[in-house]
Amino acid sequence: SNNSSNSNKHSKNSKERSKKAIASRDPAFFEAVQLQLGALGTALERLSQHPGLADDDEPALNNSGVSEQLLGVFVPSSPSSPTLKVSGNSVGETSPKSSPKSVSSKKLPSRDTLEVSFDLDEGHRVNAFLEFFPDGTASIEWSALELPVPLTYIQCLIQEVDLLDTIVPFIVNSGCLHEFPWNSADRILRVVSKPPIPFVPGMEAVAQRFAFDLLDTPWKGLCLVECSPDWKAEKPGQPPTWRSVKKPAPYQSGLKDVDVKTVVALGRPCGPTGQWTSVYFNGCGNLKVPRSLLPNWLIRQLVTLIGRFVYQRALEIVNKFDTTEYGKRLANAGPNSFYPTLKSRIKEHVEAQAREIE
């Protein structure tokens, strides 16, 4: 028992020394890594509640011996991590599928929820679940399995954010406001849209985006994470900043400022050669639009319209990918781009999955 205790203390002290050594060599980089790990941990906690993910997780891959503390930040090792089930942290409080932590004698308020399911085409379907909360926050969870679009192409469609209006309806403006030097997927983005919502002139969302390669983990995919920057002024009278980047001026006056709390999407390559992709999505934010202006019939109509539009446009682009602007950018990716590595990583993952089946 004493030996075990001493061993644990030694391991803990060793990790602390490693953290301090990394932080002392490059404080800015260490801070960025911790920030990304924190965003990933929060996002995976939310995503772990997604129907189908935990059920699909193989018990043998739960890696109970693998540390879920990375540089002092909790990051779930798998969708069915036992830590998630025991901790019952904040994700369970807002997740549509979760149950209360304890039974209260007081009557719980009725939940404002909505289910939306629709066919993309014959054989492909989207199942979505939305919930609206009293503080104005809303969450949406959806999945679409075995879509006939390779994950490499999906990542390209997402990364080239300035071309978003070619694939998503109601987009007025979109682009990358800042890209951090150590990772081309570490970016601050802005998307301005004008969906047909009565009395709403438009919406503006500025978000911090990260991307993570989780192919070699039980999550078995690429993970995209977005959250709102925490703009703060270092001194009174100075403009607010986030990671030394100044807060941009509004795109135009009158737009609703969307608070992107947490958005996470997991793309998993599937099919014999990885030619298909299954997508699991969970998002939570505040649209700053009163629930009274979002009747259920309008939400169903918008979710279905946008989902089908994006899917059909994606198929059209994929069918002639090499001749599109997306294809040109993928083919002419510079040395700092993650596209070449991404393609080889997906290929390795698919081959490894095939060997496991054999």
Image (cartoon, grey):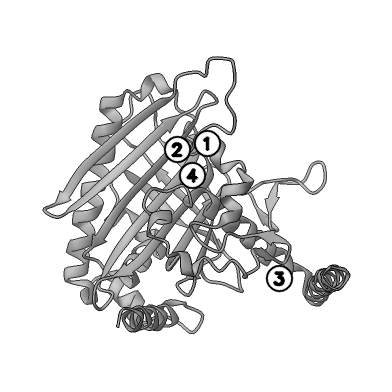
Q: CA distance from mark 1 to mark 2?
A: 8 Å
Kind of residue indicated by mark 3: Phe
Q: Which residue is mark 1?
A: 94
Q: Residue at the location (59% across, 66% down)?
A: 64
Mark closer to the chain start, 2 or 3: 3
**Numbered circle sitting on residue 205:** 4
Q: Are marks 3 and 1 in contact (CB under 8 Å)?
A: no
Q: Mark 1 or mark 4, which is nearer to you?
A: 1
Q: Residue at the location (51% across, 53% down)?
A: 226
Q: Percent x, y for residue 222?
A: 44, 67
- Evaluate whether residue 215 shows in this view: yes
Q: Quadrant of residue 306?
A: top left
Q: CA distance from mark 3 to mark 4?
A: 26 Å
Of residue 301 and residue 271, the one placed in the foreground of this image is: 271
Mark closer to the chain start, 3 or 4: 3
Q: Which residue is mark 2?
A: 139
Q: Are marks 1 and 2 in contact (CB under 8 Å)?
A: yes
Q: Which residue is mark 3?
A: 29
